[in-house]
Image (spheres, helix red, strand yellow):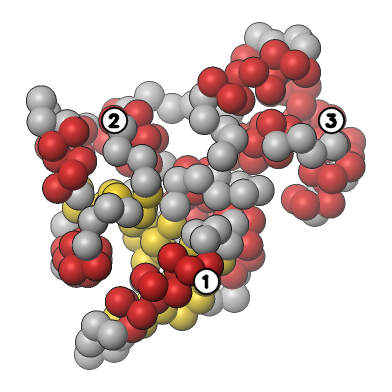
Amino acid sequence: MTDYKIILADDHAMLREGIKKIIDDTAGLEVIGEASDGLMLLKLLKQAVPNMVILDVAMPKLRGIEAAQEIHKKFPEVVILFLSMHKSREYLQKALAAGARGYVVKEDSGSELIHAIQTIRGGGSYLSPMMMKELSDDPLGILSNRDRLSEDPLTTREREILQLIADGKTSKEIAQLLFISIHTVHNHRRNIKQKLDIHKNADLVKYALQHGYTL
């Protein structure tokens, strides 16, 4: 049987090393690439398309949620598994709305991660037992209703730019990071403000902070 190919994305190198070893030591699984931020992950996917991407919610330059949305749109055959420190309903809902098939927390064991991978590989969805406890009122309801979760009014590109604005990047720096013109960045900034009914840059950053666009 062909190995199930996986790409890891997390900004902590030591954590990636540990996860890679756990996966590579499991028969039939292989890590074929690693990324330390969301933009690097998207570039990597243009070079090698895996069966699965395992990524963190909070990453520099482009959050895992936005990266997952982009992957789900451009590489629909790639399944997405989130590995996060966050155990809240809000983060789980955002992950599922972005197209994730599973959600594991970093407190879970290595064997739990492998179980999640194998479950998803077999066509199922997976939710960490720790998340099941957090969502004891209706854990399976969130999974079954993921397609009906509310969506952010911003496009993927607008969310990318909003995060970079919140990270303190100038329009010139954003243009360089995203390989677009400054004029395009300015247009996106204007559209973001219009959609959110925000007129001041300070209020834009405040919105980003309140809605989890910063690490």
SS state under label 1 = strand
Residue 10 position, x and y percent, is 50, 59
SS state under label 2 = helix
From the viewer's perspective, is 129 left or right of 105? left
Residue identifier under label 1 = 34
Residue 167 vs residue 162, the one in the foreground: 167
Under mark 3, the amino acid is His
Q: In percent of the image, x 14 and y 48: which residue is there?
A: 129
From the viewer's perspective, is 98 left or right of 12? left
Q: In percent of the image, x 17 and y 31: which residue is there?
A: 135
Residue 152 position, x and y percent, is 49, 26
Please say whether residue 10 is visible from this viewpoint. Answer: yes
Query: Mark 1 packing: few (<14 Cα in 10 Å), some, or many (20+)?
Result: many
Q: In percent of the image, x 29 and y 81: which residue is there?
A: 29
Farthest-out residue, bottom: 1
The reply to whether the C-beta atoms of the residues labelled 1 and 3 are less than 8 Å apart is no
Residue 77 position, x and y percent, is 38, 63
